[in-house]
Image (cartoon, grey):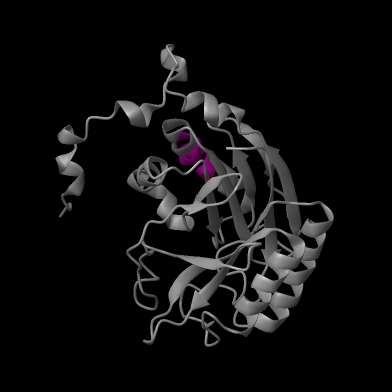
């Protein structure tokens, strides 16, 4: 992993108003470009907005007009853009997707694999756990509820992820959001020797529902945070030295060992069994 500049967005996204939200998204991309960011990550469902009771009417085809424009913006600004949207998939239950546009003009998708209980009725679950490669960092994505499944982080770490983005669309009060995140996200970072970068939609500018921005280093320490009302672009420079050190095969100290290298998968068969 090389040194990299990352941006996380906390924003209000009006439900089923993709054009209005896209105008705001483009403003954030312009602001990020002024700061020469390498990767800019928006919250889950930032384009259509999020309502847990009903899927948005305006779902995005990929490729579609907006996603093609996002690719163009990524190319012009030499930036990776990670944008949350609802993706049409040929049936009446769209995917909850993070669309990834690369500076080279290519694109990819991460589709939510673990749906919340209220989402299962109106969205489709995907089956692919992908790690995305870029010149400076290998990164993965988990969407909101998914970060509660430690196996997902382990698989992404084993596939080479050095940074996991965790975009949310959660209406929990912002001060509670910090308390909740600090119960489990540091463990995901520490156990897998990688960075965690989480962001969240705001319910509105006028109250404290939703929101939260947090970056953790591979030892679970807070690198940067923002837990206040109002829309925000949080930028942070991540140094790859700690990840590289922890994953070096020549370390002798237990404090410098990469835990995933010392696993015993033959003992973990029970992880593949469903509970009742």
Q: Is residue 219 visible?
A: no
* Lateral position of residue 271 relative to residue 217, left or right: left
In terms of depth relative to the viewer, which is nearer, 142 or 206? 142
How many discs appear?
0
Q: Quadrant of the N terminus?
A: top right
Left or right side of 209 for 95: left
Q: Residue at x 47, y 18 (%)?
A: 256
In the picture, residue 196 is in which quadrant? top right
Part of the protein shown in magenta: 180-187
Image point (37%, 41%), residue name: 158
The one of 114 and 176 positioned closer to us in this rendering? 114
Q: Residue at x 41, y 26 (%)?
A: 258
- Decide whether residue 183 is among the magenta residues: yes
Looking at the image, residue 179 sits to the left or right of residue 18; the answer is left
Q: Residue furthest top?
A: 253
Where's residue 100, x and y in %?
56, 64
Indicate whether residue 172 is drawn in magenta.
Answer: no
Q: Is residue 107 above or below residue 267?
A: below
Q: Is residue 50 visible?
A: yes
User: Please, what is the dominant secondary structure of the magenta stretch?
Assistant: helix
- Give the x, y percent position of residue 153: 40, 44
Q: Residue at horizontal 57%, vertical 51%?
A: 134
**Can you say whether 85 is above or below 275 in the image?**
below
Q: Which residue is at the front of the view, 74 or 165? A: 74
Q: Quadrant of residue 136?
A: top right
Residue placed furthest toward the right: 34
Quadrant, the C terminus = bottom left
Q: Position of residue 215 (x, y in %)?
A: 62, 41
């Amino acid at each position: 992993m090389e040194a990299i500049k990352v941006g996380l967005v906390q924003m209000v996204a009006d439900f089923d108003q993709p054009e209005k939200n896209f105008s705001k998204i483009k403003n954030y991309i312009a602001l990020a470009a002024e700061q020469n960011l390498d990767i800019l990550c928006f919250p889950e469902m930032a384009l259509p907005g999020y309502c847990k009771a009903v899927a948005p009417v305006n779902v995005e085809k990929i490729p579609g007009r907006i996603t093609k424009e996002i690719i163009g913006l990524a190319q012009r600004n030499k930036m990776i853009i990670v944008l949350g949207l609802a993706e049409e998939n040929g049936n009446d239950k769209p995917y909850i997707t993070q669309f990834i546009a690369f500076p080279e003009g290519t694109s990819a998708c991460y589709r939510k694999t673990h749906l919340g209980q209220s989402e299962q009725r109106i969205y489709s679950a995907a089956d692919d756990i992908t790690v995305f490669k870029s010149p400076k960092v290998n990164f993965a994505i988990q969407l909101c509820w998914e970060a509660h499944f430690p196996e997902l982080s382990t698989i992404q770490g084993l596939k080479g992820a050095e940074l996991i983005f965790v975009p949310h669309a959660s209406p929990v009060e912002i001060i509670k959001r910090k308390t909740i995140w600090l119960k489990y996200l540091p463990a995901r970072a520490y156990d897998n020797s990688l960075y965690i970068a989480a962001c969240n939609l705001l319910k509105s500018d006028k109250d404290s529902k939703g929101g939260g921005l947090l970056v953790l280093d591979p030892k679970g320490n807070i690198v940067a945070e923002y837990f206040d009302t109002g829309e925000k672009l949080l930028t942070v420079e991540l140094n790859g030295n700690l990840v590289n050190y922890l994953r070096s095969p020549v370390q002798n100290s237990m404090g410098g060992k990469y835990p995933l290298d010392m696993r015993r998968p033959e003992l973990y068969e029970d992880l593949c069994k469903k509970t009742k």
